Amino acid sequence: MPTLLLRLQGPMQSWGTTSRFDERDTGLEPSKSGVVGLLCAALGRDRKEPVEDLAALRMGVRVDREGVPMRDYQTATGVVVAATGKADLGRTVVSPRYYLSDAVFLVGLEGEDQALLERLHAAVRNPVWPLALGRKGFVPGLPVHLPDGLVASPLFEALECYPFLPGHGERPISLRGAIEHASEGSIRLDQPVAPFAERRFGPRFVKSVSFAGGEHVSDPIGA
């Protein structure tokens, strides 16, 4: 089954899945909702358009460089709606926003639709709208597109065998990873189940894995 590989590397990334009210969180690796949103931007797909085809792709992540969790201190004025239903223009709200500094991820998307993966590969090379790493202001430090990123290998093998992304120093003996699984693993509430305009997300299972630095071994999660 073919796999599309993407490079998510930049000075700042944020992949929140549980944000509420004024606080914005981030996970330690890219969320599926965030990656699907990035692909929608590349395709020029409106927030009101369906995303079932993209959400159906099986996603995996290889962490080539762990990001350092950081907090950005922000304030906002005139955006809080009071109990009366009107904006309180005189109130200033503190909004803590967390992000990852200097992280590098290799993301894989596996699916049976070769034509869809080919369109996505072309789209991230020449995106319709600017690409961002979780937030509009967090631009990639290097291209998301990998010229050799569309491979015939299944997801685990594609992630394990691709060259080390940082491009300097030796690849570690093992690299941490997370791969979507049909029925096992931790639950992530980042599976798009409707157009992004509706802001509806469901659960998916994600298993922690390790990618060896040497020869390929069989997929340990068997999915």
Image (tube, rainbow, N blue to C red):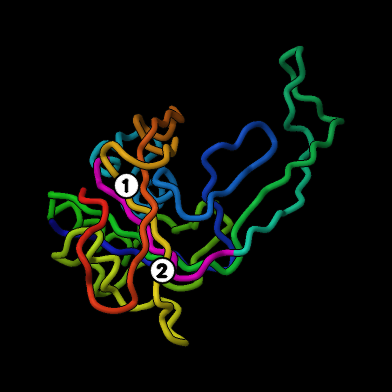
Where does residue 129 sit, x and y in percent of width and height? 41, 55
| Quadrant (top left/top right/bottom left/bottom right) for the N terminus | bottom left
Task: Identify which residue is drawn at 29% across, 79% down.
Answer: 214
Query: Dot 2 surroundings within 10 Å: few (below 14), some, or many (20 or more)?
Result: some
Give the residue type that dot 1 points to: Glu
Q: Quadrant of residue 120?
A: bottom left
Give the residue type that dot 2 points to: Leu
Magenta segment includes 28: no
Question: Marks 2 and 1: CB-CB under 8 Å?
Answer: no
Q: Is residue 6 above or below residue 77?
A: below
Where does residue 207 sit, x and y in percent of width and height? 36, 48
Looking at the image, is mark 2 or mark 1 nearer the viewer? Answer: 2
Quickly name the residue at label 2: 175
The region drawn magenta spans 56-67
Task: Identify which residue is drawn at 33% across, 62% down.
Answer: 124
Quickly name the residue at label 1: 180
Where does residue 140 sit, x and y in percent of width and height? 49, 66
Task: Identify which residue is drawn at 44% across, 58% down.
Answer: 131
Left or right: 118 in relation to 24? left
Magenta segment includes 64: yes
For this orientation, the residue located farthest to the right is: 90
Q: Viewer-proximal residue, 202 or 63? A: 63
User: Total of numbered circles in the picture?
Assistant: 2
Q: Secondary structure at mark 2?
A: strand
Q: Viewer-proximal residue, 184 or 149? A: 184
Q: Viewer-proximal residue, 6 or 158? A: 158
